[in-house]
Amino acid sequence: MTTSGSTGETMARAAERLRSAGMRVTVPRMAVLMAVSDSEGHLDADSLRGLAQRITGRLSLQATYNVLRALTDAGLVRTTQIAGHPARYETERHDNHHHFVCRACGSIRDVECAVGAAPCMEPRLPADYDTQEAAVTFWGLCPGCRAAAPLPG
């Protein structure tokens, strides 16, 4: 494991974020947190494992899932479950956003809240329900797939 240059600075930031969340600092936790933070978001556990292994060397998929669960429970990582896709992970920014999924290539993009403040929608439920979050997924074609799609006709 190397800690020189920008990687060392990134590891120091990851360690501080873990401490701030009340978590014990371990190499696997730092590596997975760095992988999530350095990615564009929306990666699955196996992809994050590959990125984290650049720091840890060997890291099992089960250990990656365990770390992701701990980071999610601590509020550092957000897990998104999209039908037909493995769970995806991104840095928890405590914002209220939704997702667009391309039906052709499977790419996922953040979409700002559709309507106002969290939870973005007002479900019709009895008053004793406490709605805290809404998860909206928009489906369609990204610009690249749309351009490549044959014209209907």
Image: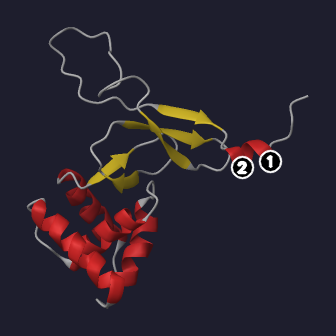
Q: 1 or 94: nearer the eye?
A: 94
Q: Position of residue 50 (x, y in %)?
A: 44, 74
Quarter residue 67 falls in: bottom left
Q: Quadrant of residue 4?
A: bottom left
Q: Is residue 49 visible?
A: yes
Residue tagged 2:
144
Query: Where, quadrant-wise, is the N terminus in this rendering?
Result: bottom left
Q: Residue furthest right?
A: 153
Residue sitting at 40 percent across and 62 percent down? 45
Q: Number of numbered discs present?
A: 2
Q: Position of residue 9 (x, y in %)?
A: 27, 80
**Dot 1 amino acid type:** Ala
Give, as a three-letter code, the residue at label 2: Gly
Q: Residue at x 23, y 72 (%)?
A: 13
**In what quadrant of the picture does the C terminus appear?**
top right
* Nearest to the observer: residue 106 or residue 66: 106
* Res. 57 visible in picture: no
Query: What secondary structure is marked by label 2?
Result: helix
SS state under label 1:
helix
Q: Which residue is mark 1?
A: 148
Specify whether 46 is left or right of 116. right
User: Is 39 on the left-hand or right-hand side of 5?
Assistant: right
Neighbourhood count class around disc 1 (C-alpha, 10 Å): few under 14, some 14–19, many 20 upward: few
Q: Outermost residue, left direction?
A: 22
Crowd tier of the residue under label 2, counting other residues whose Cα lies within 10 Å: few below 14, some 14–19, many 20 or above = few
Q: Locate residue 53, reporting x and y percent.
A: 38, 80
Tell me: residue 128, above or below residue 46: above
Q: Are marks 2 and 1 in contact (CB under 8 Å)?
A: yes
